Image: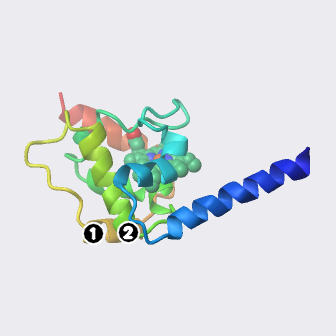
């Protein structure tokens, strides 16, 4: 039973690698599903309390100081095995696809430079930072 399972896993990995390395340019949804959706679920509802959802409230997050960077600095995003450009595309897509209702009217998508910079500054204590930042978001949006 076990060797069979291992072989199956190997095949899945090969397929994933082949997809990730192909010249075919993946769409944002595919990138999201491949690199984030496993934890945050395909439609971004997350799996509370371990994995937060990525829907509806992140438009408020981008309006507080440090909020834009935060979306990139969480380890799941910053340390994902993807390029800065792919991370930029995914996070802007998450904002527009799942959070359009809360985005400010003057929202400007994250730039590549912003993503590259923020990514070098991975959060050491994401849960603590998260708590503080969300408290700030709630205080400002009342
Ligand atoms: C292995 C599981 C996992 C993967 C894969 C993952 N994340 Fe996460 N994500 C988490 C967890 C857990 C948190 C809560 C903070 C923490 O512990 O890092 C989180 C938090 C976040 C947050 C902050 C949400 C909030 O409400 O504060 C964002 C934004 C985010 N992730 C984006 C992404 C993006 C974009 C990707 C894909 C490039 C991704 N994550 C991949 C597990 C994951």
- Placement of the N terminus among the 4 image quadrants: top right
Say what secondary structure mark 1 lies in.
helix
- Most foreground residue, 74 or 129: 74
Residue 79 locus on image (x, y percent): 51, 62
Quadrant assignment, res 84 = bottom left
Q: In x, y percent, where is residue 82?
A: 47, 66
Q: Is mark 2 within 8 Å of ligand 1?
A: no
Tell me which residue sits at (23%, 52%) in the image. 65
Residue at 71% in and 58% down: 11
Can residue 61 be seen here? The reply is: no
Quarter of the image where the C terminus is located: top left
Towards the viewer: 101 or 142:
101
Circle nearer the N terminus (1, 2): 2
Q: Secondary structure at mark 2?
A: helix
Q: Is residue 116 above or below residue 58?
A: below
- Position of 134 with respect to 21 (left or right) is left
Q: Which residue is outermost to the top?
A: 142
Label pair 1/2, CB-CB below 8 angstroms:
yes
Which x, y percent locates residue 66?
A: 28, 54
As drawn, the residue found furthest toward the left would be 106
- The circle on residue 112 is 1
Within 10 Å of the Cα at label 1, are there few (<14), some (14-19), or many (20+) other Cα atoms? some
95, 13: nearer the viewer: 13
Whole-angstrom CA distance, mark 1 to mark 2, is 7 Å
Q: Residue at x 46, y 38 (%)?
A: 42
Instruction: Please name whichever residue, 96 or 4, is drawn nearer the observer in this view of the structure.
Output: 4
Q: Which residue is mark 2?
A: 84
In the rendered image, the vertical position of residue 30 relative to residue 57, given as above or below: below
């Amino acid at each position: 039973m076990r060797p069979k399972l291992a072989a199956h896993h190997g095949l899945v990995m090969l397929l994933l690698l082949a997809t990730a390395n192909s010249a075919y340019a993946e769409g944002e949804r595919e990138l999201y599903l491949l690199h984030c959706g496993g934890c945050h679920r395909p439609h971004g509802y997350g799996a509370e309390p371990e994995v937060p959802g990525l829907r509806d409230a992140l438009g408020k997050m981008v309006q507080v100081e440090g909020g834009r960077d935060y979306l990139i600095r969480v380890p799941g995003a910053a340390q994902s095995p993807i390029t800065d450009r792919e991370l930029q595309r995914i996070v802007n897509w998450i904002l527009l696809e799942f959070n359009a209702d809360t985005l400010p009217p003057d929202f400007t998508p994250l730039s590549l430079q912003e993503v590259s910079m923020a990514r070098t500054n991975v959060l050491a204590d994401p849960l603590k930072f998260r708590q503080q930042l969300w408290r700030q978001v709630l205080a400002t949006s009342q």
